[in-house]
Image (cartoon, rainbow, N blue to C red):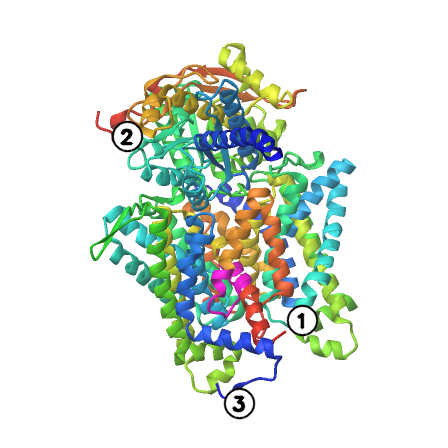
């Protein structure tokens, strides 16, 4: 921290900024700490689990939209494929969680590879539309599969007990289930941190900022986009698998385009292109929904209005605006 | 002197305050909590609200009668937004945070199955108040799962036996999901038993808003009876458009479940002459004392309105559940489940009982026809044609469902 | 089942009638995108609002015809308010922001309608003069659906005249090609955009009023229709009116014929078409290659 790096800002903001930079250096640890404390501040543990799962879903989407700049309207496909893969393996084939979950991640990544190969050649709004169309095809295919239960959803993903290295966890106990989920989400955040810190992390942001310039610098843009797409899907697949275990079932709505729309909202509310923003967005969205539905049936009005306000005045989302404030002392 | 006086007045007050407070805490801790996840938001909001009103009536009647040795019942209403994932989350919330001992609810097949999956694992009693054939079968069925509502099979047997005659030609317009398929399956069986001929079926995607592409094909089949195997908005729109295509003149419109809300939303003209099944219509009070009492109680609390079909189910589910709690003397799951299984009950429409193997409530099925014109009273929309009595013959056999013995 | 020529012809005609509504929706959406480069995710909500405005007006005036005439301008006015105060601040921030805003706006509009009109669906009777069926030679066809086709044709004609033959239309065409130059030439582009947004949402509202006698009205009626609108617009090419017409009819007919041959796939057929078109010709059938994000 040489004086050359110091900016000319008011002293108090400067201190916060420096503190924040320190935290940023240890962002994984900070995130894990927050996760560890979360269930104690939430009214019930299942809400905390939902925040983690939807946060992870938004993290996956954020990697593609916030960091790489590609808006996809088909991410529900990856959440759903992950959920159904893990669900079918556990419920109908008696698979154990330690390979059902990685299988779900792999399956989501594979579907993304197939979709990506077709979609990457389109740009902008057309990319969004192609991803929407392809995810609707995935919805249709899964709906027709007898194993998925169709409209009734997939039930019986009953993972009641988990043994790891002699330690027995009872997943019917909400707190134990929460910490089981935390392990996976924390691991995912660690991987994300490594990706963002790597040269690849720099390239995807370059693609977002100025694609032609990045291409001129010699980067293989198509391959970068495809890789970002697949990695993004892997995170969503993990979120899906965890959701299947959490609810013991997989509803067909997981694959519906409204779930794709939901993750866009989560990301925007939290802050696109930020590390922790998606969880803030998930907490905000789920919290407001929970709170509003307790008082009124018309909660969609307030959630919609909140969203509109954010788009107009806080496009960087809650977390993004907060970081911006700290960094620039405004 | 002053302090002694103070102490002598304060102390007894303090003691009684503490006693009152602890009594309140104790009685609250002993409250009988029934969770009610229903889709307050979404297309079935009206049905859901009616279910809440009816469930509240049942709870009130229980509490007014003294509860369980002073223990009161409490209804915890939650919005499941007609989304199975949300329903599961609400159920988890009700069990983990609110300490609900029983769950009643679920309006779509998917939500009730998802709720059931959560309650089953945690050995919490769940009484389902919505149609589904699947919840009676393994692996979804469980000792803690009770199905108060009719199931598609029962409905089709009752409606089919009344409407189908030997030699008739039957066609189906079926919504392409579990509910639709279950209805078709049931009706096909009745048709075969009676000697009627199924001439064809056209499936439509769930949620279709335009049926013009499906109707010509059905018209070409020339059936005597056209059965609309769909529900809610699908039912309303399909019947309306089929009428627009002039098909009502050539064939009889029949639907397995004729709901009050669909009829009101569609209007008298659209539904005129349509025949369907339902599990409750207030006109039943002419011959059934429990219906009369139920209607009177509901009217007293709801400004002269009659209870609707879906609402009445919620009333019955909560009422019979609380009666079982009284029989069992407490909220212990296995005792209450045993009490529910062992005794018949008559909440609102006559004798009902839970069959042993699948815990389906054996009950009567009503046949109604929609009135041609709107009447003075807003709830006077149907004409009660026939009551198919409660009988196990309306259900699929235990063996067929996959239960041993 | 006999696949007679009569049945095929009837099914084809039904597809055309279905396509007519699709065309209306796509035209509005395409107009807004072509001119403003705004992806209007609230288009389905404006459709629904038009239907409800129709219900309200028919209730007040006792006549379907007044509802048909007055509902679109009413909703168009609301659309213009939205453009002026909600969408205009977002120009220049990138294509995603208006999209996201209209997305949230749709939620609000649907819920507002629920609060005012109730959650349950409301009936809407076909006007007396248009009830019943007309003989087309090979079959009887609902008169009202013929009326819808006629209205759509009339509207398309009027729109074509507006865009090709009037000074306003000239500005619209120029602005779609190059908004900067148009501004340099002294034209107040933002006023033009305001009107275009109004026209686009007004057409959606018209589609809503026309749909009301077919299926009744419900707060959710806009959400399912939105996907179709997008698919048709994208297949036709965003910004192209000819594309909207061709794609709307194509998709309506394919969906209708698919019911005869592959009923399970009928609903997904439009997505398969969309995916295929986009992969072979990313700008849509009639879209201009440069008009991308």
Q: Is residue A275 magenta?
A: yes
State the CA–CA distance, disc 2 to disc 3: 77 Å
A324 vs B202, nearest the viewer = A324
Q: Quadrant of the C terminus of chain A?
A: bottom right
Q: Is residue C59 left or right of residue A171?
A: right
A84 vs B259, nearest the viewer = A84
Q: In the displayed structure, would residue A180 be above or below residue B269? A: below
State the CA–CA distance, disc 1 to disc 3: 48 Å
- Occupied quadrant, residue C233: bottom right
**Residue span colored magenta:** A262-280
Between label 1 and label 3, give the one nearer the viewer.
3
Reading the image, the residue beneath label 3 is A4
Residue for point 63% across, 44% down: C211
Q: Say which chain tag 2 marks.
A: B
Q: Say which chain tag 3 marks.
A: A
Q: Is residue C293 left or right of residue B145?
A: right
Q: Is residue B276 left or right of residue C151?
A: left
Q: Is residue C205 left or right of residue B230?
A: right
Instruction: Measuring from the top left, give residue B35's x and y in whole percent.
Output: 46, 34
Q: Secondary structure at mark 3?
A: helix
Residue for point 71% across, 35% down: C129
Reading the image, the residue beneath label 2 is B401
Between label 2 and label 3, give the one nearer the viewer.
3
Q: In the displayed structure, would residue C291 be above or below residue A307? A: below
Query: Total marks drawn?
Result: 3
Q: Are marks 1 and 2 in contact (CB under 8 Å)?
A: no
C92 vs A240, nearest the viewer = A240
A330 vs A181, nearest the viewer = A330
Q: Secondary structure at mark 2?
A: helix
Reading the image, the residue beneath label 1 is C176
State the CA–CA distance, disc 1 to disc 2: 64 Å
């Amino acid at each position: 921290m040489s004086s050359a790096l110091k900016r000319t800002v008011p002293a108090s903001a400067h201190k916060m900024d420096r503190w924040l930079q320190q935290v940023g250096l240890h962002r994984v640890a900070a995130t894990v700490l927050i996760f560890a404390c979360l269930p104690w501040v939430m009214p019930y543990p299942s809400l905390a689990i939902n925040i983690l799962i939807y946060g992870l879903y938004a993290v996956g989407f954020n990697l593609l939209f916030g960091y790489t700049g590609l808006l996809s309207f088909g991410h529900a496909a990856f959440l759903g494929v992950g959920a159904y893969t893990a669900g079918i393996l556990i419920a109908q084939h008696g698979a154990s969680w330690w390979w059902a979950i990685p299988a779900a991640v792999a399956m989501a990544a594979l579907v993304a590879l197939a979709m990506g190969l077709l979609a990457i050649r389109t740009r902008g709004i057309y990319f969004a539309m192609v991803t929407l169309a392809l995810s609707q095809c995935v919805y249709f295919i899964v709906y027709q599969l007898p194993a998925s239960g169709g409209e009734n959803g997939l039930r019986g993903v009953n993972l009641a007990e988990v043994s790891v290295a002699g330690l027995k966890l009872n997943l019917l106990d909400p707190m134990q289930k929460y910490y089981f989920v935390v392990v996976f989400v924390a691991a995912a955040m660690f991987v994300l941190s490594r990706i963002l810190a790597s040269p690849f992390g720099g390239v995807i942001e370059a693609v977002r900022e100025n694609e032609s310039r990045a291409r001129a610098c010699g980067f293989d843009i198509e391959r970068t986009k495809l890789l970002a797409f697949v990695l993004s899907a892997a995170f969503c697949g993990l979120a899906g698998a965890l959701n299947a275990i959490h609810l013991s079932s997989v509803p067909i709505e997981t694959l519906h385009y409204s779930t794709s729309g939901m993750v866009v909202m989560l990301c925007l509310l939290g802050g696109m292109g930020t590390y922790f923003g998606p969880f803030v967005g998930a907490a905000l969205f789920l919290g407001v929904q929970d709170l509003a539905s307790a008082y009124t049936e018309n909660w969609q009005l307030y959630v919609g209005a909140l969203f509109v306000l954010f788009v107009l005045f806080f496009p960087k989302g809650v977390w993004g605006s907060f970081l911006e404030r700290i960094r620039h002392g405004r | 002197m002053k302090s002694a006086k103070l102490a002598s007045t304060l102390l007894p007050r303090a003691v009684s305050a503490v006693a009152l407070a602890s009594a309140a805490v104790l009685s609250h801790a002993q409250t009988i909590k029934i969770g009610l996840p229903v889709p307050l938001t979404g297309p079935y909001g009206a049905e859901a609200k009616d279910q809440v009103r009816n469930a509240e009536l049942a709870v009130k009647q229980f509490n007014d009668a003294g509860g369980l040795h002073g223990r009161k019942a409490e209804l915890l209403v939650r919005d499941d937004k007609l989304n199975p994932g949300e329903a599961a989350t609400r159920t988890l919330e009700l069990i983990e945070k609110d300490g609900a001992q029983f769950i009643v609810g679920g309006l779509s097949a998917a939500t009730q199955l998802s709720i059931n999956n959560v309650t089953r694992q945690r050995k919490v009693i769940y009484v389902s108040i919505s149609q589904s054939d699947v919840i009676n079968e393994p692996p979804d069925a469980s000792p803690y799962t009770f199905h108060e509502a009719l199931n598609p099979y029962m409905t089709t047997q009752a409606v089919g036996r009344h409407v189908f005659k030997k030699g008739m030609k039957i066609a189906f317009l079926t919504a392409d999901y579990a509910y639709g398929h279950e209805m078709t399956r049931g009706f096909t069986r009745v048709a075969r038993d009676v000697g009627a001929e199924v001439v064809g079926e056209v499936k439509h995607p769930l949620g279709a808003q335009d049926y013009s592409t499906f109707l010509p094909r059905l018209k070409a089949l020339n059936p005597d009876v056209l059965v609309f195997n769909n529900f809610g908005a699908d039912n309303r729109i399909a019947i309306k458009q089929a009428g627009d295509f002039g098909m009502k003149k050539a064939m009889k419109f029949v639907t397995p479940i004729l709901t009050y809300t669909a009829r009101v939303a569609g209007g008298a003209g659209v539904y005129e002459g349509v025949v369907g099944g339902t599990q409750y219509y207030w006109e039943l009070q002419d011959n059934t004392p429990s219906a009369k009492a139920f209607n009177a109680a509901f009217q007293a609390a709801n400004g002269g309105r009659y209870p609707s079909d879906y609402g009445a189910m919620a009333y019955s589910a909560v009422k019979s559940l609380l009666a079982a709690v009284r029989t069992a003397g407490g909220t212990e799951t296995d005792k209450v489940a045993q009490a529910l299984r062992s005794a018949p009950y008559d909440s609102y429409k006559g004798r009902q009982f839970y069959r042993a193997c699948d815990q389906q409530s054996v009950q009567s099925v009503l046949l109604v026809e929609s009135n041609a014109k709107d009447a003075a009273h807003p709830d006077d929309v149907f004409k009660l044609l026939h009551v198919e009595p409660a009988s196990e013959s309306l259900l699929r056999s235990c063996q067929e469902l996959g239960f041993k013995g | 089942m006999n696949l007679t020529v009569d049945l095929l012809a009837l099914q084809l005609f039904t597809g055309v009638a279905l396509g007519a509504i699709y065309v209306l929706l796509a035209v509005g959406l395409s107009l807004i995108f072509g001119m403003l480069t705004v992806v209007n995710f609230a288009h389905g909500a404006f459709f629904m609002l038009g239907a409800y405005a129709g219900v309200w007006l028919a209730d007040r005036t006792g006549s379907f015809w007044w509802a048909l005439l007055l509902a679109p301008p009413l909703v168009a006015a609301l659309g213009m308010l939205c453009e002026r105060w909600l969408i205009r601040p977002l120009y220049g921030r990138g294509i995603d922001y208006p999209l996201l805003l209209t997305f949230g706006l749709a939620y609000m509009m649907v819920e507002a309608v629920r609060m005012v009109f109730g959650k349950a669906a409301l009936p809407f009777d076909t006007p007396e003069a248009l009830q019943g069926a007309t003989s087309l030679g090979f079959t009887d066809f609902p008169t009202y659906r013929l009326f819808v086709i006629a209205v759509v044709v009339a509207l398309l004609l009027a729109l074509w005249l507006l865009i090709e033959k009037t000074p306003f239309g000239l500005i619209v065409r120029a602005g779609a090609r190059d908004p900067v130059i148009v501004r340099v030439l002294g034209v107040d582009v933002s006023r033009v955009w305001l009107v275009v947004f109004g026209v686009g949402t007004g057409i959606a509202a018209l589609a809503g009023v026309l749909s009301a006698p077919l299926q009744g009205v419900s707060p959710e009626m806009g959400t399912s229709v939105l996907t179709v609108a997008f698919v048709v617009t994208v297949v036709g090419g965003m910004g192209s009116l000819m594309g909207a017409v061709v794609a709307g009819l194509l998709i309506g007919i394919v969906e209708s014929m698919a019911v005869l041959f592959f009923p399970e796939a009928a609903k997904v057929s439009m997505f398969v078409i969309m995916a295929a078109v986009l992969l072979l010709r990313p700008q849509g059938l009639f879209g201009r290659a440069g008009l991308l994000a």
